[in-house]
């Protein structure tokens, strides 16, 4: 047994390093929540075969009269299927 080998792998050092890393960024392992779908969206953003399109309900203005468009929730855009149409 080489005494230097034991010192190089001191378990106390490993524990301290892990503790600091865990406290620096506690949310690192948590996936960010996906973008909530607007009522007019047909799929989540980034879904294959879909794309962002002008909201047909408000014509891209994001508003209907004086109120927010309920389909695109004011963005003026919705995610629609574009493949196989
Ligand atoms: Zn709209």
Image (spheres, rainbow, N blue to C red):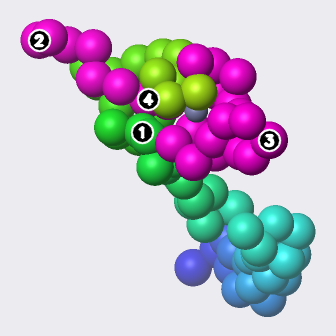
* Lower sequence index among marks 2 and 3: 3
* Lower sequence index among marks 4 and 2: 4
Residue 58 image position (x, y, % from top left): 59, 27
Which residue position holds label 1? Answer: 41
Q: Decide if residue 3 is in sight here.
A: no
Specify start and end residues of the magenta stretch as a single range.
Answer: 59-85
- Label placed on residue 79: 4
Which residue position holds label 3? Answer: 66
**Mark 3 → mark 1, Cα distance in angstroms:** 22 Å
- Left or right of 82 on screen, residue 64: right
Q: Decide if residue 80 is in sight here.
A: yes
**Mark 3 → mark 4, Cα distance in angstroms:** 23 Å
**Mark 2 → mark 3, Cα distance in angstroms:** 36 Å
- Label 1 sits on a secondary structure element that is loop
Q: Do labels 2 and 3 touch, CB within 8 Å?
A: no
* Lower sequence index among marks 3 and 4: 3
* Lower sequence index among marks 1 and 2: 1
Task: Kindly identify the residue that appears in the image at 81 percent across and 66 percent down.
Answer: 25
Q: Do labels 4 and 1 touch, CB within 8 Å?
A: yes
């Amino acid at each position: 047994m080489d005494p230097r080998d034991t010192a190089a792998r001191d378990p106390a050092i490993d524990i301290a390093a892990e503790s600091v890393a865990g406290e620096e960024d506690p949310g690192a392992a948590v996936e960010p929540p996906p973008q909530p779908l607007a009522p007019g969206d047909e799929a989540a953003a980034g879904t294959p075969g879909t794309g962002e399109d002008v909201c047909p309900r408000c014509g891209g203005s994001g508003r209907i009269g004086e109120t927010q468009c309920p389909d695109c929730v004011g963005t003026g855009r919705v995610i629609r299927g574009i493949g196989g149409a």
